[in-house]
């Protein structure tokens, strides 16, 4: 019988999750080791907590069966790649699920990443940040503004001066 | 009209609106229920309770009633009409109406004046004072609560009127969404576009501005999303982005700019991506203004790192560019023999060629050419950097003419946007055919008429020598001996050297010489040569002032002999020197890294024989299936024991192994880069051996008498041999053996000579190496005279490279 851990969100809703699901978060792992099983999370709202728990549930299920040959071979091959510092998600089905998971609007994404950072769930943070980076990559300032609904409060002269200051970055494509 | 769903029961009493449109106005109550928000993906927030053409809000103030009437509610937003009118009870109204129509009772009730002044039919004389438009705000839950709050805020603004402008400056309402303050609203009243005082640059906020005429609009800054992230999360995002993306992001709005552009953590992550030596970053940071400046420098010079070669001298001309201290340094590996301690321990001899240091703001502006001065001492020759293409494959040394007073940088790159008012100027541009130079358009100003590369060889050589001679910098002896790059724990020395040198560069104004001085010298040189009576006939029609040809012909007859025939035929193609010098006031050395289409044969580029240029050789990285690719070094002879003191040294060879495909067969080609013999055997860049990787060799390793040497793999191949003269070597059969300790051995079948190779990490070897003397500056950069011996130690005409060079022990 798996041990259940209770997470209490900021607006008082309680969620019971299995231990292994909750242990995706390093913070929760540490707290449970010291203290009791009811963990209040005042800065996380219910809506965000539901989504985070869903992610953890999916990844806990996968991590408990790590020995599928395709995923381990993929893990070995991708371990030599450079930039991402967290362990790469190897299973293509899981990767597909992750891509579906992050099809959210900007506000939800940022809420999730703040909550995941607070709970110290490295994979989720990296996944969401990669998605956000994809939305920024290769875009001009005007397109980024449209994407994130940012208001341009520079005067044209200021903007021109800033563009010139930053021209070194834009030159090298 | 339909009521909105879920409305609260109306309060009793009060206004009984019984007329036409009035029937539609319902008392809904002050609070709308929270909307059912459907998140249909990005950008499609719906507020289901707000139906168009309904009243969503009504409030009774002291003397007026305020109503918000929804005009439109769809995917793009909602808009409301917020209106107010004086409040009157129905009985009073009807009474007044009757009175008004009968008794003209304006005096009875002052309030009645408003009403009675109007026509009966316009009982609903709402004072339409504002239209509140609420665009769909991405990422913010637009619920009824929010709308109510917004309406109330705007109502307050309306009620207080334009007089209240200054009082409302600080008026803020805090909107909460259940987890704390979401954003704050500033309200003000003005008649024009929202003035800047309403925007607080550092806070993400929504500003509602009520205009005098009645237009309200709402703005929202999505930058709050980024600004709500903790610092280290922002830095994690930058791991996935390029500097260009970060700069674009920081350009978005005022709030984002300090968060991104000034954040040290974000730019530190960017710096790390460019893989400088890891422990060096904090040390280098102290030399520049910020991590952003450091990132600017690293990103600008990173394309220069690697190995650059030239055909001449045939023994090998290998320049390795590596990280210095807040700089990149190009050093040449001298053709040499292997020292007594072998490749791993023995110092590799190298001579400095150039270095590029970073300025305070991170721009790679301090360029120094290393070379031997007139009196034989090691000197520095300052110059500037032209432009560095991120995919550069050729490094050119040029002279640049610049206008001093305006401080413009007239780049030598043809920009497609010729921003010039002079029609003849533009025409000339079109006529001049560009090289296959695809460099970024850096010129903001009219590009000059003639690029340096189009001048004839003699002019180019002359200019370079002259300018270099004029800008030579006397370096104090302690700095000459100072290290160029990191060895171990000499960071302070390096930092000190760097700061002194950068200061010197600035003092010399970047190594620019005044054109007038140049002209005077030319004139005197001209007179001198005329007196000698040693003028060769030059058919260029030139002003005597600019005639430099005569002077140089004295000194460099060999070049003239070669280039003269060319000059005779091609004087139409090559523009005269004075046209080149015309646009500028000052001259200076300049280094330019460009990308050109180069043809290669077996991974060795075809090089121009009279360009002062170095060509980049990409070092392939070993990958699965191409395990042997990369830079290898070694000597001939077996066993590969280290030679002792009494035995003569073995010539050191550098080879670059790449995988090519020829006629469908995969081949491993070993290109010779450096040969340490005294007189070259085979041309530079020839293939020392070629192995067929799909054909295993049946030969046994010849010295494996007792079966100790475990051979992992062996391939058949062909090794270089004497052929038809020097230029066209032949090949003889042989075999390549991959040994178990990571060594390679290529054995010529007939002669049984063995070439033993091991992998080389050139930057590491150079750091442990030993510095030797340089040649005169321009020759030090690029030695264009055909030579088959070791010119780099030709200072003392010594045949042994170890013996009698001047060593600057590091």
Image: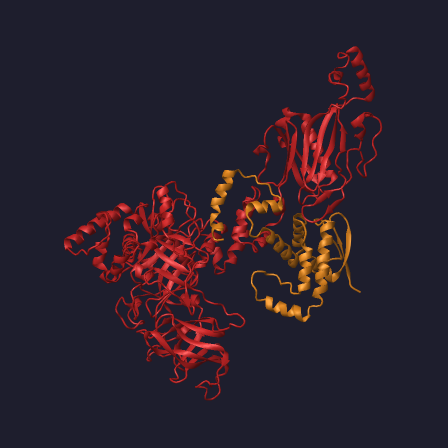
Look at the picture and state if A111 lies above or below B602: above
**Total residue callouts:** 0
Query: Does residue B475 appear in the picture of this structure?
Result: yes
Look at the picture and state if B624 lies above or below B753: above
Residue B206 percent location from the top left of the image = 64, 38
Left or right, B608 with respect to B739, comes to left
Query: Does residue B512 appear in the picture of this structure?
Result: no
Residue sitting at the far right: B12
Out of B779 and A1, give the one closest to the viewer: B779
Q: Colour of chain A?
A: orange
Left or right, B483 with respect to B286, comes to left
Residue B403 percent location from the top left of the image = 34, 44
Look at the picture and state if B677 lies above or below B42: below
Quarter containing the C terminus of chain B: bottom left
Residue A8 percent location from the top left of the image = 75, 52
Out of B533 and B29, give the one closest to the viewer: B533
Left or right, B612 with respect to B603, comes to left
Out of A85 and B590, give the one closest to the viewer: B590
Residue sitting at the far bottom: B706
User: Chain letter for red?
Assistant: B
Residue B96 percent location from the top left of the image = 80, 16
Q: Residue at x 80, y 13 (%)?
A: B99
Q: Quadrant of residue B371?
A: bottom left
Q: Quadrant of residue B1?
A: top right
Tell me the colour scheme of the image.
by chain
């Amino acid at each position: 019988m798996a041990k259940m851990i209770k997470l209490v969100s900021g607006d008082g809703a309680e969620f019971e999750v299995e231990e292994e699901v909750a242990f995706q978060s390093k913070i929760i792992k540490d707290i449970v080791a010291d203290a009791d099983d009811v963990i209040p999370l005042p800065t996380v709202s219910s809506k965000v907590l539901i989504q985070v728990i869903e992610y953890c549930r999916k990844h806990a299920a996968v991590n408990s069966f790590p020995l599928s040959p395709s995923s381990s071979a993929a893990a070995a091959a991708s371990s030599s790649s450079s930039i991402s510092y967290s362990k790469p998600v190897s299973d293509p089905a899981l990767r597909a699920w992750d891509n579906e998971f992050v099809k959210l609007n900007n506000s939800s994404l940022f809420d999730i990443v703040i909550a995941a950072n607070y709970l110290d769930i490295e994979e989720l943070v990296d996944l969401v940040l990669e998605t956000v980076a994809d939305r920024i990559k290769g875009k001009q300032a005007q397109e980024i503004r449209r994407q994130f609904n940012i208001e341009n409060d520079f005067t044209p002269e200021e903007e021109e001066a800033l563009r010139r200051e930053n021209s070194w970055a834009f030159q090298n494509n | 009209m339909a009521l909105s769903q879920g409305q609260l029961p109306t309060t009793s009493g009060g206004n009984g609106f019984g007329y036409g449109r009035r029937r539609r106005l319902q008392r809904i109550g002050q609070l709308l229920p929270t909307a059912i928000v459907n998140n249909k993906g990005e950008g499609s927030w719906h507020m289901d309770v707000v139906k168009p053409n309904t009243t969503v809000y009504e409030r009774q103030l002291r003397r007026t009633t305020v109503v918000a009437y929804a005009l439109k509610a769809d995917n793009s937003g909602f808009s409301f009409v917020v209106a107010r009118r004086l409040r009157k009870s129905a009985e009073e109204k009807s009474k007044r109406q009757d009175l008004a129509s009968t008794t003209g009772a304006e005096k009875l009730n002052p309030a009645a004046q408003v009403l009675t002044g109007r026509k009966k039919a316009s009982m609903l004389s709402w004072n339409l004072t504002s239209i509140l438009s609420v665009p769909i705000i991405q990422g913010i839950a637009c619920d009824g609560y929010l709308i109510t709050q917004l309406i109330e805020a705007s109502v307050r603004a309306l009620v207080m009127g334009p007089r209240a402008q200054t009082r409302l400056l600080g008026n803020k309402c805090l909107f909460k969404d259940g987890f704390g303050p979401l954003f704050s609203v500033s309200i003000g009243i003005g008649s024009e576009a929202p003035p800047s005082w309403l925007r607080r640059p550092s806070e993400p906020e929504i500003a509602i501005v009520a205009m005098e005429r009645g237009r309200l609009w709402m703005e929202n800054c999505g930058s709050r999303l980024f600004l709500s992230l903790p610092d280290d999360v922002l830095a994690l995002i930058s791991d996935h982005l390029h500097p260009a993306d970060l700069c674009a992001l920081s350009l978005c709005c005022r709030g984002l700019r300090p968060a991104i552009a000034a954040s040290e953590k974000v730019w530190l992550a960017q710096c790390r991506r460019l893989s400088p030596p890891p422990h060096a970053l904090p040390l280098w940071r102290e030399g520049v203004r910020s991590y952003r400046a450091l990132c600017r420098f690293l990103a600008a010079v990173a394309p220069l790192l690697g190995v650059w070669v030239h055909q001449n001298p045939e023994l090998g001309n290998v320049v390795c560019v590596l990280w210095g201290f807040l700089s990149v340094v190009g050093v040449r590996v001298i053709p040499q023999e292997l020292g007594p301690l072998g490749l791993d321990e023995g110092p590799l001899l190298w001579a400095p060629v150039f270095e590029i240091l970073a300025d305070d703001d991170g721009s790679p502006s301090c360029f120094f050419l290393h070379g031997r001065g007139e009196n034989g001492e090691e000197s520095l020759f300052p110059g500037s950097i032209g432009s560095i293409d991120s995919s550069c494959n050729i490094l050119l040394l040029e002279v640049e003419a610049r206008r001093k007073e305006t401080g413009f940088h007239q780049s030598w790159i043809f920009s497609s946007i010729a921003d010039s008012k002079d029609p003849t100027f533009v025409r000339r541009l079109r006529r001049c055919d560009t090289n296959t130079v695809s460099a970024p358009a850096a010129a903001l100003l009219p590009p000059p008429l003639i690029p340096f590369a189009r001048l004839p060889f003699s002019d180019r050589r002359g200019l370079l020598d002259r300018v270099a001679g004029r800008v030579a910098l006397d370096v104090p002896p302690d700095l000459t001996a100072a290290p160029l790059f990191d060895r171990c724990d000499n960071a302070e020395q390096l930092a000190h050297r760097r700061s002194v040198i950068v200061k010197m560069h600035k003092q010399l104004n970047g190594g620019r010489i005044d054109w007038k001085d140049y002209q005077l010298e030319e004139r005197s040189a001209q007179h001198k040569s005329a007196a000698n009576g040693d003028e060769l006939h030059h058919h260029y029609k030139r002003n005597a002032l600019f005639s430099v040809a005569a002077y140089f012909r004295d000194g460099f007859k060999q070049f003239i002999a070669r280039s003269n025939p060319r000059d005779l035929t091609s004087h139409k193609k090559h523009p005269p020197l004075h046209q080149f010098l015309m646009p500028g006031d000052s001259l200076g050395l300049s280094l330019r890294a460009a990308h050109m289409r180069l043809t290669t044969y077996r991974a060795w580029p075809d090089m121009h024989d009279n360009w002062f240029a170095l060509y980049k050789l990409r070092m392939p990285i070993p990958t699965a299936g191409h395990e042997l690719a990369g830079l290898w070094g070694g000597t001939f002879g077996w066993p590969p024991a280290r030679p002792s003191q009494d035995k003569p040294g073995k010539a050191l060879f550098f080879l670059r192994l790449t995988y090519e495909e020829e006629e469908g067969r995969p081949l491993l080609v070993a290109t010779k880069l450096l040969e340490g013999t005294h007189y070259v055997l085979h041309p530079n860049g020839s293939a020392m051996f070629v192995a067929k990787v799909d054909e295993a060799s049946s030969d046994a390793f010849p010295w494996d008498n007792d079966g100790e040497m475990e051979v992992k793999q062996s391939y058949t191949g062909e090794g270089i041999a004497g052929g038809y003269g020097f230029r066209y070597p032949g090949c003889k059969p042989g075999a390549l053996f991959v040994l178990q300790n990571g060594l390679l051995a290529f054995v010529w079948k007939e002669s049984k000579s063995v070439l033993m190779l091991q992998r080389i990490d050139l930057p590491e070897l150079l750091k442990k190496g030993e510095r030797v003397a340089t040649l005169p500056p321009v020759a030090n950069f690029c030695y264009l005279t055909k030579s088959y011996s070791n010119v780099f130690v030709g200072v003392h005409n010594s045949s042994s490279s170890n013996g009698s060079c001047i060593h600057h022990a590091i």
